[in-house]
Image (cartoon, rainbow, N blue to C red):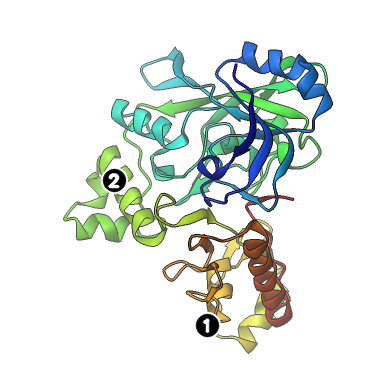
Amino acid sequence: MKVNQNCSLKKYNTFGLNVSAKYLIEVTSLVELIEVLKSNLAKEQKVYFLGGGSNILLCNNIDGLVIVNKIEGIQIEDETDKDVTIKAYSGTSWHQLVLYAVAQQWYGIENMSLIPGSVGAAPMQNIGAYGVELKDSFVCLEALNLANLKLETFKHDECAFGYRESVFKRHLKNQYFIYSVTLRLSKNHKINTSYGDIESTLIQQQIDPKNATIKQVSDAVIAIRQSKLPDPNKLGNSGSFFKNPVIKTGHFTQLKEKYPDIKGYEVQDGIKVPAGWLIESLGWKGKRIGNTGSHAKQALVLVNYGNAKGEEVKKLAFDIIKSVENTYQINLEPEVNIWE
């Protein structure tokens, strides 16, 4: 394994931020990972793990060891006439996993097409899109305990999935390295086109939503995301920067009286308010400040226009948070992990 010193992380993060790591090593197997973690280098340096780099904001140079996860692969664990259980290793591209399932006509994750990042990040924040979340097809995961370097299995309930969160973002944060994720997908024709613009997009493509194929649904989701979200290869970004906040029903009722156009959707814990609407209503959408700004087509997306520093993006994010708090008394939380 090659140890890179003072290595630029620009190609390892979708924001395209040009910070450097004191040391960087790419690992392609669990054996290699454990070997690195047992090394003197890992014992002497603070260790950081990097996957697809699509959900992080790098604010400063990393004074430590960055381990880049390149442990890839997909395999069938079990198969019946009704469903199939597959294991994907954590360095695998999430979108490539979705395309693989779609090609096999295995249903369950097609609505999450084109979500950036790696498989390992998916359970950490219970990724989701268009009415579907990872937890809906999740069976279990294998994770390396960083304290004793032993592999442990976490079943569905042990992950404590919530809206864009899991136990790995709370009290087990930074204690485990997710090695593999196991999903159960259906072989029966069961699609969900009721959420967002999927149905209208299919109709525009002269496809009957009730009879759409799994590939047509996946292609529709890809088309929608490409129309709203900038390509990180052309304009640095990390997708949706903020979570959609959930507020108490009484709070929403008060806001509705004062701001009749405010949007909200009933969920189990109250009312989910679209963060994009809140940000856009305050004039941030499309606003550019120096080398960063809120994207013109999607207010939730903060972008790097070419030479942004992580601190610039962070300042913009917290200015937006303060603006929303002052006007609506709603606390926006970053969905992106901020490395400082």
Looking at the picture, which amino acid does disc 1 mark? Asp
Q: CA distance from mark 2 to mark 1?
A: 32 Å
Q: Quadrant of the N terminus?
A: top right
Above or below: residue 32 compared with residue 318: above
Residue at 67% in and 45% down: 165
Image mark for residue 219: 2
Furthest residue toward left: 206
Image spot of residue 83 (x, y percent): 41, 22
Q: Nearer the viewer, residue 313 or 163?
A: 313
Determine which quarter of the picture holds residue 49. top right
**Is residue 214 visible to the viewer in this orientation of the structure?**
yes
Furthest residue toward front: 6
Q: Is residue 90 left or right of residue 205?
A: right
- Camera-near label (2 vs 1) is 2
Q: Residues within 10 Å of mark 1 (few under 14, many from 20)?
A: few
Q: Nearer the viewer, residue 162 or 18?
A: 18
Q: Is residue 4 left or right of residue 44?
A: left
Looking at the picture, which amino acid does disc 2 mark? Asp
Image mark for residue 261: 1
Q: Nearer the viewer, residue 55 or 340?
A: 340
Residue at 69% in and 58% down: 269
Image mark for residue 316: none
